[in-house]
Image: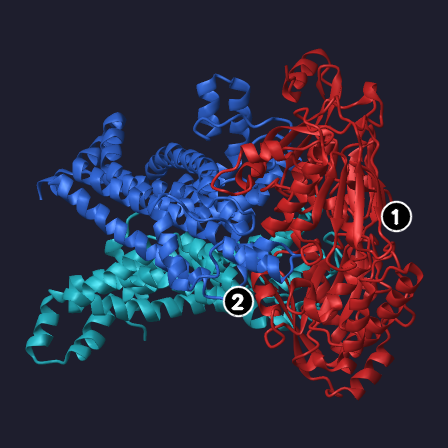
């Protein structure tokens, strides 16, 4: 029997109207209510991911490995252990013996093989991570508990992507295939996983209700007594009702709040803010091939004119400046010396060396339509460029238009502001954005050209010798900064506000904005 | 010496409280638009000066309506915003009338296939949700005041076709048109000298009303994030941003909205008043 | 004869709808954009983008895409959203009841407030009540709905705390499985009084804002009809004696005002549906308006096209129904 909070409210109002409402209960257990602004249109783990989607996916599914902690570590999950061959080509995973899907089927090697095959063949969502290095035929179920992957060529980031390949139950998927779609239609709103939560109600636009799986094969870290009854993800588009819900204890955790809102929330009793440095970088990509910004001196002039303090101030201090193309915390990250900071004299010197010594040009700054922070950063940039006599045309465009324009150097805007969240901890995830192969893609709109850097990036992703690889990436970072293909901006903090009775929150920067791992969380009262 | 008719009209206008209110509001907005740059306290704030440390200040003696999210004076931006809104409102209305009225008169006088074709296309545009269509168009083309104007003109002109057609149709049978035709006046001359001037009153009334509605429509697009590019001050866009700062910084949203309301109200009341004078027969309520 | 008229009007509406389909298709393709990239996601490589292009049929030439879209429409399919991969038809089925509910409530407010206020205003013609209502009537179309909505939220939700700010139900309330999708109706059908009052609390502010332009028009029409009625000789005479048959006058005025009021409902219905894009955005009301706006801003045009068609259809149907009712109710037209 589901006791709704409304019922409790009615009862509480009769007995003690002044008593604040508590968390939701179900039987003797509590239900955690989490609220954010982003819907979960498609739950299929091989078709789509974004922060809200992946949070639910991580709840209902397991992968071979899992990311935890800050800095992020990869820990064994469905796989107890794995071995990599010395040549970096073969990876062998040994599965946990007791892992079962929600319907009781064992999570066996065939399920793993099937899931990777499905991910690769659908060629959507996560497929890009491994598509070029792994062929479906090269995944072999050696025995019920052993899977072997043989890569086409060495690919060092392989392990860093495995945690995002969730394992589905092939029997359930195959029983629900319609018109040869690999179960795609069915998995859009249903789950076939082995994760800590079972899907109870899925209404991707407003509410997702999950029950804890009492018999979860991995057990529960907070102990059986404290295990939740379940978790509810409530999609509330506007910030004000989310905040009001938290204050009234109707919601236990909220995210997607503005820095100004977070500041106000911090003052309230019974509410705790979690504020952590994330992995998402904000940069302003120059068009390095066409137009005025093809001139490296102009790029450097602009980068030295930028008011970096404003980037921090816009976030009320909740952001850090980038000191490298890589976010801190990523393997091999170095703080690159001489990365531009505001210095008008230097900016003017660079400008004098450029093809536009007197400025007098207008540049276009494009951001994704409807995003508030990039618009304000555009305003700050506009103000910063005034001393150089450079005018800025701030344009918001739909994502689709921006990407279409960026696909060719001839049409790419002079400057495009982009957020990039690395999906893995491996430096290649970020470095490859600067490779020739990324030209014209969302993160490659700068059309950055430096054959030597390209060669190093290509080589580093296949390197097995770790120290040599790290040294290579240090050099790559220095060279990219020297070429200034973008204004290296800032890394905004990730923030959540929650009731202080919420326990077990664990931050990991590798997760997306707003995304939390619900598994270790519980409510103490 | 004023003509009798003009004096009568002025007397009528003066007698009506609401018309005078409308006239006053419109005059006020026009005045602000003309004098804007010389009377605002912080002229730099409209060109994109950024002063983050002074952001979101409540109303005070130095900033009567407070400051916005980048520390700009809200009053300054709202006053300068009057220029854009007025220009855009008048521009859209004129453009729509310039397209719609000739087409309408053509349809009304020509008849036959031409009329059928013009009116069916008009009906199509009249039967579509104008705002939705404008949103789609601006979203596709990318926000910007010019795109917003193009989109709104596209959904605005059919109203004028309808009006002009109806008027021309009713004039067609009038004796003086008949007479002109018999006297051998060219078709163009009839249209230009007789039909157009006689259809003018309802068109002027509609235009006066429409300036207000066009201001509102542009502000609506701005509110949805599809208006003027920053840092250009635009009322709707200001409200859109201010909305993110409700309820703690509520004063930010008040001022731009009040200006939209005042100017749209002004043009509507003025239009009402003009209708009483110019087009008394159509005065229903 | 009526049947033939209806058939002709329906055929015409069909042609118009086709025109609307063409128009929206042109708009959706007027600017350079790459929906496949949106479908594939920000991290996708070329292979995945091309895959998405094939999956969504975006690799076909435009005229083929158009024919396919028209074919889909004929089968009641509205295509798939590139941003979410979901069927637009299913999304519309989900969002439209919310919008319909909002518009119905708004229209009711317009009638219930507009008619009596118009009559009162006529009774007190040129007195302060009349002036106030006239200003109010003009304000109905002059108030920016998005701003007025924010003001109401501030006043009634934030400061007074009487009503909720936005949304359709409280965050603590689990939305019930839809029957009609209209919460007020569903809660009545289920006999769930608590749910009924809760959803009523959520709908009142957005419906009020949405109703204003319509309310203003209804008010004006009823005022002027009432003024006409009061001008009749026998009323003037009766007034002079101080014995006015008020009920008679009211009934007479109501009768006269019925047709123009009906016309306004027909005219404003489509308009109202169109302005839901603003009101739903302000109040976070999960209807077709909000769906259209958020999709348009993301550059996802299939939903926008779907909403335009649905709203266009409403426009046309409302006009048709009003025309037919006119025929039934107005003896002059019926005899003609």
Nearest the eye: B88 or A247:
A247
Q: Which chain is painted in blue?
A: C
Rendered position, C134 above or below A128? above
Chain letter, cyan:
B
- For the residues labelled 1 and 2, the Cα–Cα distance comes to 46 Å
Judge left or right: residue B204 versus residue A157. Answer: left
Q: Nearer the viewer, mark 1 or mark 2?
A: 1
Where does the image place residue C71, in percent across and percent down from the top left?
A: 35, 51
Q: Is residue A133 above or below residue B106?
A: above
Point out which mark residue A71 bears. Answer: 1
Residue name at image x 58 percent, y 42 percent: A41
Residues indicated by labels 1 and 2 sit on the same polypeptide chain: no
Q: Position of residue C289 (x, y in %)?
A: 48, 46
Q: Residues within 10 Å of mark 2 (few under 14, many from 20)?
A: many
Residue at x 63%, y 38% (from the top left corner):
A236
The residue to which callout 2 is attached is B145
Q: Residue furthest left?
A: B182
């Amino acid at each position: 029997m589901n006791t709704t909070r409304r019922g409790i409210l009615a009862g509480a109002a009769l007995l003690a109207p002044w008593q604040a409402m508590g968390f939701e209960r179900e039987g003797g257990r509590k239900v955690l209510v989490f609220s954010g602004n982003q819907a979960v249109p498609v739950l299929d783990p091989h078709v789509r991911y974004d922060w809200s989607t992946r949070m639910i996916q991580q709840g209902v599914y397991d992968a071979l490995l899992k990311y935890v902690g800050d800095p992020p570590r990869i820990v064994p999950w469905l796989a107890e252990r794995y071995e990599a061959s010395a040549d970096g080509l073969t990876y062998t995973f040994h599965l946990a013996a007791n892992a079962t899907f929600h319907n009781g089927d064992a999570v066996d090697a065939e399920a793993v093989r099937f899931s990777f095959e499905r991910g690769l063949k659908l060629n959507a969502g996560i497929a890009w991570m491994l598509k070029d290095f792994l062929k479906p035929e090269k995944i072999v179920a050696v025995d019920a508990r052993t899977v072997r992957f043989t890569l086409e060529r060495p690919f060092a980031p392989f392990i860093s992507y495995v945690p995002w390949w969730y394992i589905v139950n092939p029997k359930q998927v195959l029983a629900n295939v319609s018109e040869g779609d690999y179960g795609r239609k069915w998995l859009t709103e249903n789950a076939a996983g082995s994760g800590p939560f079972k899907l109870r109600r899925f209404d991707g636009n407003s509410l997702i209700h999950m029950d804890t799986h009492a018999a979860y094969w991995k057990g529960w870290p907070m102990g059986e007594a404290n295990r939740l009854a379940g978790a509810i993800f409530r999609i509330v588009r506007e910030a004000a009702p989310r905040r009001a819900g938290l204050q009234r204890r109707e919601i236990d955790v909220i995210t997607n709040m503005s820095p100004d809102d977070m500041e106000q929330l911090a003052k309230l009793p019974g509410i705790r803010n979690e504020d952590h440095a994330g992995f998402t970088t904000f940069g302003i990509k120059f068009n390095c091939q066409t137009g005025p910004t093809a001139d490296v001196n102009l790029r450097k002039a602009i980068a030295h004119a930028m008011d970096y303090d404003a980037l921090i101030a816009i976030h009320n201090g909740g952001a850090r400046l980038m000191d490298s193309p890589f976010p801190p915390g990523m393997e091999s990250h170095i703080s690159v010396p001489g990365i531009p900071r505001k210095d008008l004299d230097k900016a003017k010197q660079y400008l004098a060396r450029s093809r536009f010594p007197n400025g007098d040009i207008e540049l276009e700054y494009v951001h994704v339509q409807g995003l508030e922070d990039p618009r304000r950063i555009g305003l700050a940039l506009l103000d910063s460029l005034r001393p150089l006599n450079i005018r800025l045309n701030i344009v918001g465009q739909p994502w689709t238009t921006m990407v279409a324009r960026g696909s060719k150097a001839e049409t790419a805007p002079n400057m495009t502001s982009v957020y990039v969240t690395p999906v893995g901890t491996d430096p290649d995830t970020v470095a490859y954005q600067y490779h020739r192969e990324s030209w014209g893609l969302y993160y490659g709109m700068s059309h950055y050209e430096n054959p030597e850097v390209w060669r190093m990036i290509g080589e580093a992703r296949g390197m097995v010798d770790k120290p040599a690889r790290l040294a290579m990436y240090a050099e790559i970072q220095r060279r990219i900064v020297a070429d200034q293909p973008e204004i290296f901006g800032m890394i905004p903090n990730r923030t959540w506000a929650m009731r202080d009775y919420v326990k077990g929150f664990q931050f990991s920067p590798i997760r997306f904005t707003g995304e939390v791992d619900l598994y270790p969380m519980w409510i103490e009262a | 010496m004023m003509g009798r008719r003009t004096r009568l009209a002025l007397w009528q206008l003066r007698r009506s409280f609401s018309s005078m209110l409308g006239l006053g509001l419109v005059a006020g907005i026009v005045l602000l638009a003309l004098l804007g740059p010389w009377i605002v306290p912080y002229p730099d704030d409209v060109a994109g000066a950024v002063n983050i440390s002074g952001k979101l200040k409540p109303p005070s003696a130095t900033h009567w309506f407070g400051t916005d999210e980048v520390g700009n004076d809200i009053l300054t931006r709202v006053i300068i915003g009057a220029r854009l809104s007025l220009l855009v409102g008048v521009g859209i209305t004129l453009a729509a009338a310039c397209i719609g009225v000739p087409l309408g008169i053509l349809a009304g006088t020509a008849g036959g296939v031409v009329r059928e074709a013009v009116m069916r296309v008009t009906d199509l545009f009249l039967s579509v949700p104008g705002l939705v269509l404008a949103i789609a168009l601006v979203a596709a083309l990318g926000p910007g005041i010019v795109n917003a104007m193009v989109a709104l003109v596209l959904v605005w002109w059919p109203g004028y076709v309808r009006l002009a057609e109806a008027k021309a149709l009713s004039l067609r049978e009038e004796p003086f048109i008949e007479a002109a035709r018999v006297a051998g006046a060219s078709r163009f001359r009839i249209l230009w000298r007789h039909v157009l001037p006689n259809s003018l009153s309802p068109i002027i009334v509609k235009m006066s009303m429409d300036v207000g509605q066009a201001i509102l429509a542009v502000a609506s697009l701005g509110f949805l994030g599809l208006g003027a590019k920053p840092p250009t001050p635009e009322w709707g866009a200001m409200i859109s941003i201010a909305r993110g700062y409700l309820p703690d910084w509520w004063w930010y949203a008040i001022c731009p909205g009040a200006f939209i309301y005042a100017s749209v109200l002004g043009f509507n009341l003025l239009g009402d008043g003009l209708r009483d004078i110019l087009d008394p027969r159509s005065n229903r309520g | 004869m009526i049947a033939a008229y209806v058939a002709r009007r329906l055929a015409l509406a069909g042609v118009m709808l086709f025109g609307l389909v063409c128009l929206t298709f042109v708009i959706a393709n007027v600017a350079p954009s790459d929906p496949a990239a949106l479908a594939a996601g920000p991290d996708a490589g070329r292979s995945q983008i091309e895959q998405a292009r094939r999956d969504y049929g975006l690799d076909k030439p435009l005229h083929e895409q158009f024919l396919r879209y028209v074919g889909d429409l004929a089968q009641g399919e509205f295509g798939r959203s590139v941003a979410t991969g979901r069927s637009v038809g299913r999304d519309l089925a989900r969002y439209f009841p919310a919008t319909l509910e909002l518009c119905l409530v708004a229209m009711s407010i317009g009638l219930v407030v507009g008619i009596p206020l118009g009559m009162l205003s006529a009774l007190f013609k040129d007195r302060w009540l009349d002036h106030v209502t006239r200003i109010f009537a003009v304000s109905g179309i002059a108030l920016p709905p998005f701003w007025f909505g924010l003001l109401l939220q501030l006043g009634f939700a934030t400061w007074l705390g009487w009503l909720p700010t936005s949304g359709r139900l409280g965050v603590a309330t689990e939305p019930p499985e839809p029957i009609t999708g209209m919460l007020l109706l569903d809660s009545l059908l289920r006999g769930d009084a608590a749910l009924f009052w809760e959803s009523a609390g959520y709908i009142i502010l957005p419906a009020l804002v949405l109703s204003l332009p319509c309310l203003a028009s209804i008010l004006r029409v009823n005022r002027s009809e009432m003024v006409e009625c009061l001008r009749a000789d026998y009323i003037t005479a009766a007034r002079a004696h101080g014995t006015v048959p008020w009920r008679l006058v009211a009934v007479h005025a109501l009768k006269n005002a019925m047709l123009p009021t009906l016309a306004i409902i027909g005219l404003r219905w489509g308009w109202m549906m169109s302005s839901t894009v603003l009101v739903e955005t302000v109040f976070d009301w999960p209807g077709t308006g909000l769906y259209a706006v958020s999709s348009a801003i993301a550059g996802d045009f299939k939903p926008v096209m779907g909403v335009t068609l649905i709203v266009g259809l409403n426009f046309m149907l409302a006009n048709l129904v009003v025309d037919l009712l006119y025929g039934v109710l107005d003896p002059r037209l019926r005899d003609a």
